[in-house]
Amino acid sequence: MSNNRGDKSILRSIKNPSSRRYEINIHCPELTFLGEREQPDFGCVDLRMVPSDKVIELKSFKKYIYSFRNSFLSYERFINTIYNHIAETYAPIELSISVKFKPRGGISSSLAIDSKEIDGSIIE
């Protein structure tokens, strides 16, 4: 078990090929990490961003998501960690992330964070 909160150094960028404002949507249905009492948690991550001068290199994002696999995290820590790492690495104009977790113990959960709702602040 690891208390690692994802490996931000895995994330790579590509120069934004356009000066136009556009939106990038990434859907990652293969999220896994360790939750309460080292029980595995499974979920789906959806990321939406309006890029500035850098965009996400998708292969690195996939590897980044997989870097959480043996980490021990709460749902709340997970979504805030991803938000911070993406905001710090890519400095997007807008960023929103939602995560839907599979049921565990008969309860499912979903979380969302949006830069428009928190004035673009990075949550520590």
Image (spheres, rainbow, N blue to C red):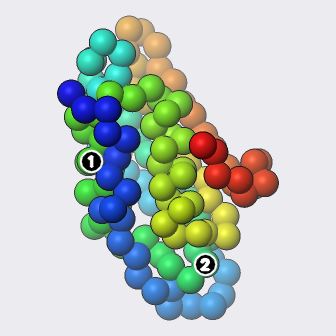
Give the image location of residue 5, x and y in percent: 37, 41
Callout 2: helix, strand or loop?
loop
Q: Is residue 22 left or right of residue 81?
A: right
Determine the CA span between mark 1 and mark 2. 25 Å
Left/right of residue 38 with respect to residue 27 in the rendered view: left
Circle 2 sits on which residue? 52
Outermost residue to the top? 105
Question: Which quadrant is the N terminus positioned in?
Answer: top left
Q: Is residue 2 visible?
A: yes
Residue on which disc 1 sits: 67
Residue 12, picture quadrant? bottom left
Seen at 58% across and 74% down, the residue is 51
113 vs 118, left or right, is left
* Residue 17 pos. (x, y %): 50, 91
Local crowd size for mark 2, using a 10 Å CA cut-off: few (<14), some (14–19), many (≥20) = some
Q: Which residue lies at the image location 72% right of the left edge and 57% below the top edge?
A: 120
Residue at 67%, 64% in the rendered image = 94
User: Vertically, is 85 above or below 56?
Assistant: above
Q: Position of residue 84 (x, y in %)?
A: 54, 52
Marks 1 and 2, the one that precedes in the sequence: 2
Residue 62 visible to an observer of this rendering = no
